Image (cartoon, grey):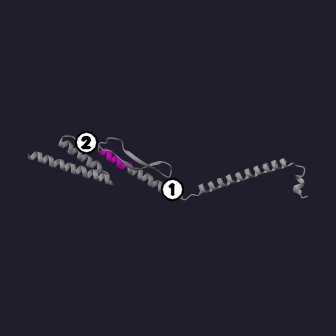
Amino acid sequence: MDIITEQFENISLHQLYTKLSTKHAEIEKLEEKDKIESIKKQDYIEASINKYDDDDFARVLEKFKNKDAEIRTHEQVHASIGHTTVPISYSYQQGPDGKMYAVGGSVRLETSMPDDPKAAAFKLDMLQKAASAPSNTSGADNAIASQSNLNKILLQLKGEENANK
C-alpha cells in the first residue's frame, strides 16, 4: 500500500467524500482570493498610469479658466449696455480639476419697440451697441447688430415718408 491509501484505510466512503468536499471548498476560496487580489492589482496599475503630465494638466486647466473668463466678460458686456429680460445663461463643461467652467453663454435683451419713433431709434441704437460691444462678436451678435441697423434705417425711411405727406 502506498501512503495515501494507508492514511484513508479505516475511513468510510462518506467520511472520505466529506474530507474531499472540505478540501475542494478551501481550494475554491483560495482561487477566489487570488482572483480578487489579481483584480485589485490590475485596477491599481491601470489607475496609476498617468497619460498626462503636470504640464499638460496645467495647460488644459488654464485654457478652461481663460475661456470661462472670456465667456463671462463677453456676456456681461452685452448685459451692461442693453436691457436684459432674464439673467445671463451659461453652458458649462467640467474641467480636469472637476470644477465647472463656462464654455458658452447667452443674454436675452429686451427687444420690444416703443411707439415713439425717437424712442424706438434710441432703443435700436442701444441694441446695436449691446450686440457689437464685445471685441470678439459671434455670428448671433453680428446678426442682431445688423438687424437693429436695418430696423433703424427702415424707421428713418418711414419717418421721412410721413414727413413728406
Q: Amino acid at mark 2?
A: Ser
Percent x, y of residue 94: 47, 50
Q: Amino acid at mark 1?
A: Phe
Q: Residues within 10 Å of mark 2 (few under 14, many from 20)?
A: few
Residue 39 falls left or right of residue 129: right
Look at 46% across and 54% down and name the residue there. Answer: 62
Residue at (19%, 50%) from the top-left corner?
153
Secondary element at tag 1: helix
Seen as rendered, the residue at the extreme front is 13
Please tell me whether residue 22 belongs to the stretch shown in magenta.
no
Q: Name the element at disc 2.
A: loop
**What is the quadrant of residue 123 in the picture?**
top left
User: Which residue is depicted at the point 18% across and 47% down?
Assistant: 155
What predominant SS class does the magenta segment belong to? helix
- The residue segment tinted magenta is 72-81
Q: Which numbered disc, 2 or 1, marks the residue closer to the eye?
A: 2
Image quadrant occupied by the N terminus = bottom right
| Side (left or right) of 53 relative to 106 | right
Upstream in sequence: badge 2 or badge 1: 1
Q: Which class describes the residues within 10 Å of circle 1: few (<14), some (14-19), or many (20+)?
A: few
Per the rendering, the mark at residue 57 is 1
Closest to the observer, 97 or 108:
108
Q: Which residue was labeled with disc 2?
A: 112
